Amino acid sequence: MHVKSLSSHLAALTLICCTAADAVELRHITVETGTKGLVSTPVSVINAAGEDLVCNADLAHWYSAEVGRAPIGGAAKLDLWFKPDSGAYFVLNDKQENMPVEALWCGIAGRAYETRFLLPLARHKGAEAAARAITCTDAQGVLACG
């Protein structure tokens, strides 16, 4: 096959394969801000694990953000907000935007994901959400909280 012919075929393939990637649906998404309609539900994570802890909130299936750190013998205050109308939990970003929390977990710093403990969240409509304290310990190399 000649180089010119190969180039033509590649150009045609690129047009066929990649045209669909340009089709993106753009739509306006309203992001709620502030705490109107939300109930403050802070969680204190008390570190009895013997190593520093880090806590994260999964905000989307591809993104998580650190929401607190607890030094050995100390505690981290995780500022969560609960929406009784929907049963959803949120953290607020620097713009006070409501960031939905899909999961909340803590782990040993430096190995947080491998040692994580998923903190339970009561996620049903009309649930009573209140401040609470959870103590975490090292259970043979993974975190155990309760």
Image (cartoon, helix red, strand yellow):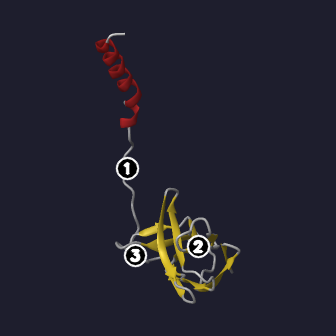
Percent x, y of residue 43: 56, 82
Question: Can residue 86 be seen from the camera position used here?
Answer: no
SS type, badge 3: loop
Specify the quadrant that holds the N terminus: top left
Between disc 2 and disc 3, the foreground one is: 2
Check contact, mark 1 vs mark 3: CB within 8 A: no
Q: Residue furthest left?
A: 4
Closer to the camera in the image, 127 or 60: 60
Residue that badge 2 annotates: 107
Instruction: Report the Cα–Cα distance between label 2 and label 1.
Output: 37 Å
Instruction: Report the Cα–Cα distance between label 1 and label 3.
Output: 23 Å
Between disc 2 and disc 1, the foreground one is: 2
SS type, badge 2: strand
Q: Quadrant of residue 87?
A: bottom right
Instruction: Report the Cα–Cα distance between label 2 and label 3.
Output: 29 Å
Residue that badge 1 annotates: 27
Q: Residues within 10 Å of mark 2 (few under 14, many from 20)?
A: many
Mark 2 or mark 3, which has the lower sequence index?
Answer: 3
Check contact, mark 2 vs mark 1: CB within 8 A: no
Q: In this image, 26 relative to 87: left or right?
A: left
Q: What amino acid does circle 1 point to?
A: Arg
Residue that badge 3 annotates: 34
| Residue visible at 44% across and 70% down in the picture | 98
SS type, badge 1: loop
Q: What amino acid does circle 2 point to?
A: Gly
Q: In this image, 13 relative to 84: left or right?
A: left
Q: Quadrant of residue 75?
A: bottom right
Specify the quadrant that holds the C terminus: bottom right
Q: What amino acid does circle 3 point to?
A: Gly
Closer to the camera in the image, 77 or 4: 4
Percent x, y of residue 81: 51, 77
